[in-house]
Amino acid sequence: MYAQIQLWSSVVGLVVVVAGWVHYLALIPQEKVPARPTLHTSLMGLSILAIVATFTVGIVMGQVPSVVSWILAGNVVVLGGFFLYLLTQAPLPDQAIKVRLGEPFPLLTAPDSQGTIHSSETWKGKRVLFKFFRGYW
């Protein structure tokens, strides 16, 4: 009996984790990603805790989960944990965006990968693609 509870909790946990991922990723192109994704982090954390608790109680009661339950539960823990990790790595800034579409680009000077300093004044009237990264990943 408890082995079925472990199986169903694994299935539900996997559905919740995958649905959380899909929902969050669907918000990105719409530019509606919340500054603090508490709903997503809560769902991932609760799914992981529910799986761990269900399996712990079952094992203590002498109910060994099936191989399918272990595989599903492992996916919940790995995917949910990875999603939680990703959400902690790139929080959105708290301040408002300073530059809007169509506005002139502010004066900027920065080095490229070879150390040459470039200024935004030299690009006036040209299309320029900026790609910012932290440089440590």
Image (cartoon, helix red, strand yellow):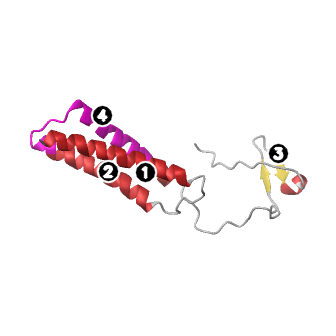
Image quarter hosting the N terminus: top left
Tell me how many marks there are: 4
Give 96 or 111, whichever is nearer the viewer. 96
Q: Main secondary structure of the magenta part?
A: helix
**In this view, the mark in front (1 or 3):** 1
Residue 61 lies, in percent from the top left, at: 9, 43
Please tell me which of labels 1 and 2 falls first in the chain. 1
- Above or below, comparing residue 113 to residue 105 in the picture: above
Q: Secondary structure at mark 1?
A: helix
**Quarter of the image with the C terminus in it:** top right
Which residue is identified by label 4? 71
**Residue bearing the label numbered 1:** 20
Q: Image quarter for residue 33?
A: bottom right
User: What segment is highlighted magenta in the picture?
Assistant: 58-83
**Which mark is drawn over residue 41?**
none
Residue 40 picture quarter: bottom left
Residue 46 against residue 55 in the figure, above or below = below
**Dot 3 corresponds to which residue?**
116
Q: CA distance from mark 1 to mark 3?
A: 43 Å
Q: Residues within 10 Å of mark 4 (few under 14, many from 20)?
A: few
- Residue at which label 2 appears: 47
Name the mark nearer the viewer: 4 or 3.
4
Q: Secondary structure at mark 2?
A: helix
- Describe the element under mark 4 as helix, strand or loop: helix
Q: Amino acid at mark 1?
A: Gly
- Residue type indicated by callout 2: Ser
Q: Nearer the viewer, residue 30 or 78?
A: 30
- Dot 3: element: loop
100 drawn magenta: no
Label 2, label 3: how many angstroms apart (C-alpha)?
49 Å
